[in-house]
Image: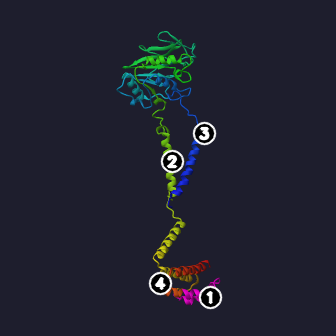
Amino acid sequence: MKLTIKRWIPLVGLLGVFIVIGVFLSPEKLKEYPAYVSESPSPTGIKALYTYLENEGDAISRWSLSPDRLSKKETGQLLIMAEPFTVPDQEEMEEYEDFMRRGNTILLLKDNPKGMFDIKTEMIDSPILPLVRDGKGNTYETDALSGVRLEEETGDQVLLDDVDGTIAYKTDVGQGSLIVSTTPAWMTNGSILEKDHLSLILLLLKEAGAQEGTILFDEFLHGGESGATLATLYPQWLLLLLLQSAIFTLLGLWMQGKRFGGILTPREETVRFSDERIKALSAWYLKGKQYKASLLIQSDYVRLLFQERWGIPTSKEWEDLKEPLARRLQTVSEKEIASFLMGIKGVQNKDRISKQEYIMWSKRLELFRKEVEDR
């Protein structure tokens, strides 16, 4: 089927209407964010802290790649791990430790950091007092305290503690350091402005040297590189363009009659193409003014029908067919049959015939053909 612009216009218009309706009438769903993600504005996210540090002019960015991609040349960087979803495997842990040995710092805030960096912890009952002390003896009031306390080793610097034990400490790793805290809830959007949480978080950042170098928020352990999907890897406009291109391609193939699967030629297709060949042949005869030749072919076909249907031999002359035809063509009078037989013989004996004669005798032959085929 030949495609034209007129056939494409309504199809494109209809598809455009469906797209517009889908965009404007589809209910907008609120985006759900995981907890402790730096771009999450929800109460469990930490976007407020990220934005605060960004506004303070610190060199800050998100890190969503595996630890082996961390810079092996720069020093003085701070990598913040806020409640990692998973514990890194051995190879990843070695990469993080190598990152610290080169002179960088990791600030790990996790309710129970046991299993990471050989950290040892102990469980306690509910905290007795919501008061926290720093290394200088200053006290801070807090709402959120974990039921886990850290077991520091010789040489570790206690940064925060309470009556139940150590809450945060700092330890050297090569040329860098590791700071561990069991209170990630302090830095969430819903809690950072409660009580003295902001002051405590800033104290930990200061101990980590946040003002000295680049600050990285580790999103790899929140499913960064490993959790990438098609929707997150490519922009929405590109995905929409690819979807529309796929739809237009399928519609184009369908309108051109493309078929997928086994080859099956229906009878209608064969008949249609046969009719087209006949029409092309007749058009060639008309353009070449081969009126007599075309008329002879039509008359021979009618004679062949007389033989197949009624057993009248084709060897008989036209004038000898009056009686056989009169017996079988009851709807045609004998006078009309005699006039036809006399006239067709005369036309066939002419050297050339006009277009008007050709059309008239073609119609008369067509009438006899229908009479024979309908019986």
Mark 3 residue type: Pro
Of pointers 3 and 1, the one earlier in the residue sequence: 3
Q: Disc 4 vs disc 3: which is toward the camera?
A: 4
Decide: few, some or many residues near mark 1? Use Cα within 10 Å; few <14, some 14-19, many ≥20.
few
Residue at (54%, 22%) from the top-left corner?
185
Q: Position of residue 7 (x, y in %)?
A: 53, 57
Residue at (54%, 52%) from the top-left corner?
12
Of pointers 2 and 1, the one earlier in the residue sequence: 2
Mark 2 residue type: Gln
The answer for how far apart the CA atoms under marks 3 and 2 are is 21 Å
Q: Is residue 319 magenta?
A: yes
Q: Which is the main secondary structure of the residues drawn in magenta?
A: helix
Residue under numbered circle 4: 352
Mark 4 residue type: Arg
Query: Which label number is shown at residue 335?
Result: 1
CB of mark 3 within 8 Å of CB of mark 1?
no
CB of mark 4 within 8 Å of CB of mark 3?
no
Q: Position of residue 318 (x, y in %)?
A: 54, 88
The answer for how far apart the CA atoms under marks 4 and 1 are is 27 Å
Secondary structure under tag 3 reads: loop
CB of mark 4 within 8 Å of CB of mark 1?
no
Viewer can see residue 71: yes
Q: Disc 2 vs disc 4: which is toward the camera?
A: 4
The answer for how far apart the CA atoms under marks 2 and 4 are is 62 Å
Q: Where is residue 331 in the image (x, y as percent from the top left)?
A: 65, 82
Query: Which label number is shown at residue 27?
Result: 3
Of pointers 3 and 2, the one earlier in the residue sequence: 3
In the figure, residue 125 lies in which quadrant? top right
Residue at (52%, 20%) from the top-left corner?
183
Secondary structure under tag 4 reads: loop
Q: Considering only vertical position in the picture, is 189 above or below 369?
A: above
Secondary structure under tag 1 reads: helix
